[in-house]
Image: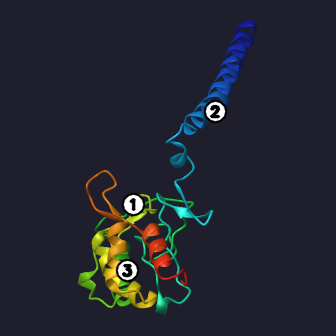
Amino acid sequence: MKALLKQTGAGLRVLIVMTVLLGVIYPLAVWAVSRIPGLQDNAEGSVVTQNGQAVGSSLIGIDPVAKDPANDPWFHTRPSATAKDVLGPGDPSTSGASNKGPYNQDLVDAITKRKDLIAQREGAKPDQVPADAVTADAAGVDPTISVAYADLQIARVARVTRLPEAKVRELVEQNTGGAGIGVPGVNVLKVNLAVQAAAGGAH
């Protein structure tokens, strides 16, 4: 009995110490680090604001939905594996990949359907649709698209927003970066905000 009480007491002490350490001190330490200047923006989700209001995140891709699909003024992100529809939009509060391999028929069918839908939307041939336009990334919330996918969308965005194609292309270039890895990518949220501002915010 004495040994049992001794073991129970030791277990309770470990429980209390670990609860305080991992349930109180560790979260407070992480929060304190996130307040360090230069880290706070990332810790808060890299929120992008416009006129004092949050409009999205520079690190979390949210595919915009056009009020009129026939007159779509937006650049679109990559598809999300968590989306109910083949092109999305996905739920930015969740992330994850489909984990389907290249020989999975469901994935092959989804890619084929995405390619046809995007080609129709952009007035292009299916073989002109780049790979990132029809495949989801590992998290499903990629904020950037390839320059090729952005180029494919320029003509439609220019036509609907009534901006010159040269101006839209310039805005795409201004919002293209390498994200530190040397691979050019276009931030969808930022380029959409730039296009909206250039078009007078009508869209």
Disc 3 marks which amino acid?
Arg
Residue on which disc 2 sits: 28
Label 2 sits on a secondary structure element that is helix
Q: Earlier in the sequence, mark 2 or mark 3?
A: 2
Q: Nearer the viewer, residue 51 or 34?
A: 51
Indicate the quadrant where residue 47 lies.
bottom right
Indicate the quadrant where residue 139 lies.
bottom left
Disc 1 marks which amino acid?
Asn
- Judge from the rendering whether residue 12 lies leftward or rightward of residue 182; answer left or right: right
- Marks 2 and 1 in Cβ contact (< 8 Å): no
* Residue shown at the point (28%, 52%) measured from the top left: 181
Which residue extends farthest top? 2
Which residue extends farthest left? 127
Label 3 sits on a secondary structure element that is helix
Packing grade of label 3 (10 A; few <14, some 14-19, many >=20) is many
Q: Is residue 18 above or below residue 123?
A: above
Which label sits in the foreground, 3 or 1? 3
Q: Which mark is residue 114?
A: 3
Instruction: List x then y, in percent, for residue 118.
Output: 37, 83
Residue on which disc 1 sits: 99
